[in-house]
Each structure stands twice: as structure tokens, then as C-alpha cells.
Amino acid sequence: MERLKKGGLSIFNWVEKRTGLVKPLGEMASHPTPGSATSWWYVFGSAAMVLLMLQVVTGILLALVYSPSAGNAWHSLQFINHNLPLGWFLRALHGWGSDFMIAVVLIHMVQVFLFGAYKFPRELTWIIGVFLLLCTLGMAFTGQVLRFDQDAYWGLGIGASITSRMPGIGPQAVHMLLGGPIIGGGTLSRFFALHVFVIPGALLALVGLHLLMVLRLGINEWPMPGRLVRKADYERNYAALTKSTGVPFVPNAAWKDAVFAAAIMLAVMACAFFFGPFGPGGVPDPTIIQTAPKPDFFFLWLFAVLAYLPPEMETAAVLIAPPILIGGLILLPLLASEGEKHWSRRPVAVIVLTLIAVTLGTFTHLGLHAPWSPVMDSWSSDPIPAIYLEHRTPLERKGALLFQQKQCRDCHSLGGVGGKRGPALDSVATEMTEDQMIRQVLQGGGNMPAYGNALSPAETEALTHFLRTLRGPGLRPAYDASQGLQPQNASHPVAP
Amino acid sequence: MSHPIEDPNVPTPQSEVPREWLGTPQEIAAAHSSSNSRRGFLFKLAVGLNALVGMVLAAPIIGYLVGPALKKDAENNSWVSLGPVDAFPIGQTRLAEYVNPVVSPTDGETAKTACWVRHAEDGNFQVFAINCAHLGCPVRWFEQSKLFLCPCHGGAYYIDGSRASGPPERGLFEHKHRIERGSLLILTGQLPTLSTEACNGPKGSLKTLVQSIGADTADTTGRSAWNG
């Protein structure tokens, strides 16, 4: 035993003499951390790094089998899911790992922002962090493309369509993005190269730099109201604080990092085990048009924004907003590098953060439900509520039938069922007169297509007769007050 | 008992350096000679040489990288047959499939593409790309309401491809077409987007179809429902 120990030590010494790696690593591990910075709030950065390692390992394992060719990618994923032992679990780990990584990176960013940790002298650490965020989102988008199913295919189409709006170089940019004139083999292989070589390379290099700077500049102290950052004396003050309250990073802070990382890994494994891998969805065959493409969770907000942008603003918004947002994030530490770090003294920062969070949350929620999309099969699958058909004349029932046949239901709900693109029509008759309805149906307007060419006069009459019965119990249909002077007003039917 | 752990990073204590390691006079003279400026110049020259090599190397790399972007539209587009004209009855809009004229060996199913063929009442043809003019999602034709609807963001187009409502700022992309020996041919080859249009169809034609029309043009589905 004694000899074994001695032998082991001499091998270690032989290697350390030649590499000199262990000593600096030991110094890194024991670098003094302000006691307040060993909080549970400081665990997200290391958790993001652990998730990155998980992604690297599971990614390499998937690349052993995945075939980055447009003709085979989808089939190779099915093969991993169904024919390889635990292949489904590996794909699930990689997919859920990616979602967790984005979430943890965002939380890390919010924490750093709220704690004012981006201020002097850590401005560049934040700026590199912004590029790390972009790399992470880039990995998420390219990864979604590698899943090469219908969503991936049409997602690429959306990417190409946005790119095509670039003034002057639109066509060239589209063909660069797609690696050819259409979405095909060239497209997938270049997204594979981005996802597997280019972005991970940048990501790992930037993470190394990010980490090196954290070690060099020290972990941000817990902010205190009144503990102001000034370029003139911050470093001296930080050194004094670290001297009086500092503790070695290992084990004082490291144990919390380790516990949280383990918890996150367990959570990823649990999600992977219970919810399984993401897709792949339908075959990426562009002739199958019965599909409603949707992006992955973290891009749903963008999906919603693109639905709500007015047509005339769209090109400007998609080309100008991203550089402004990214530029703002990069400039933030340069413009606000001094002053208060504590959130209670930075109300504007807290309000802006809340606003961004609520906005992203709202758009993500809308993206999940996509109320702007017609429900394409509502007209043939959702019956008209029976109560809307009772005691109705044959003409009104004919109108109800037309309401379904002309696919009005795809955009207008009745009884809470149907599309949400247009307003629900359960009480339309109390809001619009017959003339207004006819005008709206035939001419369209306000985001409704005109049905003048799709309805005959007889059909229009039947439809409006049905619509005039849609009103609350005991309510009269709306009527044109100016027509009240004319005798035919009496012909308005009363509510059944 | 414990072994003293020697720090391997500390160099072993130096004793007198042997004479042989102090350098010969020639070596010392060469190191301190006045040719330092010459070496500095040579180094700059070497850096310049590498910059030159780098530039020569960059040309094929950049050429390879941007190759797909440099092709002219004319090289991508060619005429493709959609089959006999008889397959598209008058008064109907039907989905047609074709294989893109430019394919690569790994395209698989993505080499296939679809388009909407409208054989209008007046005998004229219109061929629309399935890609919505907003963000490229596949639009679906609804015969009953005579609308193309997009599943992504709810863009809608009329029977003639003009914009009806929603986020698109123009009508559907239209392929150039011609009829040759009973076959319908279209000019196609690249993913239609706002800057890579399928062809030079009327751009952003915003026809409004407002007035109601005679009962004789009502669609057959509606009429049979009347009778049934």
C-alpha cells in the first residue's frame, strides 16, 4: 500500500513537472470569493456550463448515428428513436438539455442584470455573455433544423423569407442560407456544420474566456444599497472586501454549484424519461401541405410577433429590431458601468426587466395558442351548437349550413368552438345590422377577406338570416335607427 | 509516516552551470550581432509572405462558400412539366407536384415541390407557389370559400392569388407557364421568397373583389347543399 502510494505520487510529480497544470488549477479552485457571493443565487452560470457539457457529450453520441443528408436525416432519427437501445433517451436528453440550457442561461442573465454584476470591471464579461446567449439560441435554431421534420422544413422557409427581405442582397443571402436554390441537401449539411463545428467551437472558446475573466476579476460581490461602483476605487474596495470576508471558492461556494448542477441534471433526465424525445414530426416532404408549422418553445414569441406585425412594418421590424436589441445588450455595461448595483436603487432596470419578461411571456403564450391562425378543420369537424338551430326557419338553418360550408367557422367561433382569427359571432346580431353584415361578408375588411365571389345572392341572404338569430336571449337584433322611420322595419323578426 | 510532497513546479536548485552550457564565443557573438534589424525585417517579410499566401488561399475558400449565392436566376430556373392539361379541369384549383429542376444527390424528398394550378372559367391558367408571400408556409386552397389560407400566421388570398387579408403584403407568388403539346409547363427552380420570386407575375396586385355576383357562378357544393 505504502509503495503504491509512493509510486502514484511519483507519476503525478513526473506529469506535473512537465505540464504544470495542477498547481494553477488548485489556485483557481481556492481563489478567494466574497463570503456573500457563495449564495444560492450564484449557481446558474456553472449549471449552464454543466448543461453545455451534457449537450457536447449527447451531441457526439447522436452524431455517431445521425445522417446529415436531407434524404436520410428523418429516417436516421426514427432509427435512433426506435431501433437503437436507449437511442430515444439520448435524443430526449439532448432535446431537454437544450431547453434547460436556454432557460438556465436566461435566468443567469437576469440574475447578473439584477445584481449589477455587469458593471465595472466586468463589462466585457457581460458582452461575451451576450454572444454566448446568441450562440445558445443559434444552437437551438440549428438543432431544430437538424430534426429535419415538417416544422424544420417550413422553419427554414420562414428563415429564408425573413432573409429575403434584406435590401439589395436578398436573393444572394437566401441562397447562401439555403446552400442552393431550394431547401434541400445543401441546406441541411450546412446547418449541420454550423450546429456541430462552427457554433460549438465559438461557444466553447467564449465560455473559456468568460470563465477566465470571472477568475481574473473575481466573483461579483453581493450588492448592497449604497455600496457604489466607481472606476477609481472599485478594485481596491473589492480587494478589501475579499480580504475581510473572502473564503476559498472550493468548498464554500462550489458545494452549492455542485448540488444545483446535480439537481438540474436530474431534472433533465426526469423530463427526458417521462416526456421522451422531441419528434421528429412529419416527413419533410414539401408536397404534404396539411401541416401547421410551429417553432420550438423558445422561438414561439418570435412566431407570435411575426403574426402581429402590420404588413407595412414587417420588413423594417425584422431587419432593424434585432441589431437594436443586441446592440442595446452590448452597450448596457458600457453606458452604465458605475453606480448602484442593488436592485432596490435601480427602479428603471427592474421595470425594464419586468416589461421584457411580461412581453416575452405574453407572446410565448399567444404563440402556444396561435389565435391568429384559422382552425383549418373546424368547418368540417365542429358542429353548430344545437341551441342555435332550435326554432329556426328553414332559411336560417340553411344559413347555418352555409356558415359551416363556407368555412366561416375556421375563423369565427360559435359556442366557444372554432377559429379565433375573427371575433366570436355568438351575439353578432346585437352588434351589427343586417346591412352591415352583408357589407362585411361581401366586401370583407378589417382583416376579413371578401366573400363576394364565393357567395351567391341567395346564399348571402340565407347566411345573414342565420347570423341575425345570433344574439343573447331576449335581445333584439341591431337595426339602423334611420330606417326606423320606414314601414318595413316591422319585418325584423323578433327573438324566438 | 508521510512522504514529503515535493512541488514539481519548483526547478531543482542550481549549482554552478558547466562551462559547456555557457555558449561558445561564436554563439554569443551571433546572438548579439548587429543583424537584429535584419532579422526584424526578415520576420516582417515572412509575415507579409504569409499574408499573401493567406489571400491566395482565401480566394477559393470564399468562392466555395458564396458559390450558391453567385448563381444567376436563369441558371436555377427552367421549364418543368406538370402533366397533361386535361388533369386540371376548368373552373378548378388543384395541387400539382413536380421535382425541382435543380437537385443535389442528397435532397431526398425535399427535391419535390408542389404548386396550385388554377384553370379559370375563361380557360386561362394561373400557377401559384404554395409558399405564402409572408414567410413561406404552405397555403391551402379552400374550394368552398374560394380562399387560400396559410396555417402559420393566417394570411389569406383570393382565388386569383391576390391578397385578401392577414400579414402578407402582396399576393401569392406566380409561376410563369405555357402549354406545349397538351402539357402544362411552368418556369421554376428556386424557393420563392420576396426577393427570389417564382417569376415576374404582377407584383402585389391588390385586386378587390367586392360586388356580389350572379347565382349561376355559385359553386356546385353550395348548390347541391341547397337541393339536399
Image (spheres, rainbow, N blue to C red):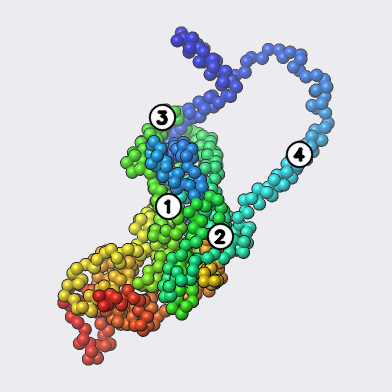
Residue A11 appears left or right of B20: left
Q: Residues within 10 Å of mark 4 (few under 14, many from 20)?
A: few
Residue B8 appears left or right of A33: right
Residue type beneath disc 2:
Pro
Nearest the viewer among B89 and A415 is B89
Q: Find the residue positioned furthest to the front.
A: B181
> What chain letter is assigned to the residue under label 2?
B
Residue type beneath disc 3:
Asn
**Which residue is pictured at 31% across the width and 75% down the height?**
B222
Comparing marks 4 and 2, which lies closer to the viewer? 2
Q: Where on the picture, by quarter, is residue A430?
A: bottom left
* Residue A138 visible in rendering: no
**Which residue is pictured at 35% across the width and 56% down the height?**
A368
Q: Earlier in the sequence, mark 1 or mark 3?
A: 3
Residue designated by label 2: B101
Residue designated by label 3: A252
Q: Residues within 10 Å of mark 2 (few under 14, many from 20)?
A: some
State the quadrant of the N terminus of chain A. top left
Comparing marks 2 and 1, which lies closer to the viewer? 2
Please, what secondary structure does the residue beneath circle 4 have? helix
**Which residue is pictured at 36% across the width and 38% down the height?**
A269
Q: Position of residue A10 (x, y in %)?
A: 54, 15
